[in-house]
Image (spheres, grey):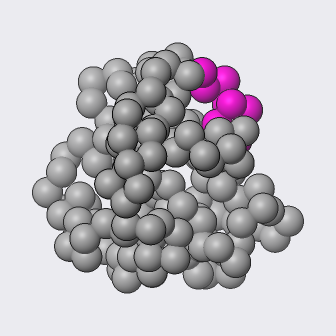
Amino acid sequence: MAKVQFRKMEESDIEVVKEIDKRSFSIPWPDDIYEEELKKNHYAQYFVAVLDEKVIGFCGSWMVLDEAQITNIALDPDHRGKGYGQGLFQFVINYAVAHGIRHLSLEVRVSNLTAQRMYKKFGMKPGGIRKNYYSDNQEDALVLWVNL
């Protein structure tokens, strides 16, 4: 595996992140959301995975008091299956713990077994179902959580 670096997302990363979002999700976030998250949301913490000076993935979170919620995580489809997503998720967890976060949660499509397997490697456990969570096809979301 090539050496991937992880760091906080910067404004200069937004265009690439939006492209990864569009290539990864059936309903990508609106174009202005990442800029708003970085500039206006004091709870938002966004991170990127960088390979050969190119952003190949990102992870967003909201960190409030001692809890963190993963808002989204994606790797460019050309770079999946190489462990980079796992590395990025570990980086976010390490950052969260270093900043006093004790509980982490996220939602994942019930059909996304690949992501669920990765999250379970980090000790995440099912906490419930959000019915009809995804607006593109009304798929349920599995809520996963872990105490850090």
Quarter of the view holding residue 31: bottom left
Magenta-colored stretch includes residue 35: no
Q: Is residue 11 visible?
A: yes
> Residue 108 at what x, y percent from top left?
51, 42
Q: Position of residue 57 (x, y in %)?
A: 56, 66
Residue drawn where x is 47% and y is 66% of the image: 25
Question: What quarter of the picture does the C terminus occupy?
Answer: top right
Provide residue 133's location: percent of width, then percent of height. Answer: 35, 42
Q: How many marks?
A: 0
Task: Name the residue furthest right.
Answer: 1
* 120 with respect to 13 (left or right): right
Instruction: Point out the residue furthest to the left here.
Output: 40
Which quadrant holds the N terminus? bottom right
Q: Which is nearer the eye, 94 or 35?
A: 35
Relative to 127, does residue 51 appear above or below in the rendering?
below
User: Closer to the camera, 48 or 117?
Assistant: 117
Q: Position of residue 106 (x, y in %)?
A: 45, 36
Choose top left, top right, bottom left or bottom right for residue 77.
Answer: bottom right
Residue at figure coordinates x 73%, y 32% from the top left: 121
Residue depicted at 20% across the width and 73% down the height: 32
Front residue of this view, candidates 84 and 91: 84
Tell me the magenta residue range. 118-125
Q: Is residue 68 left or right of residue 79?
A: left
- Is residue 65 shown left or right of residue 82? left
User: Eyeballing the image, is 140 above or below 122?
Assistant: below
Residue sitting at x 58%, y 59%: 6
Residue 60 seen: no
The answer to whether 15 is drawn above or below residue 2 in the figure is: below
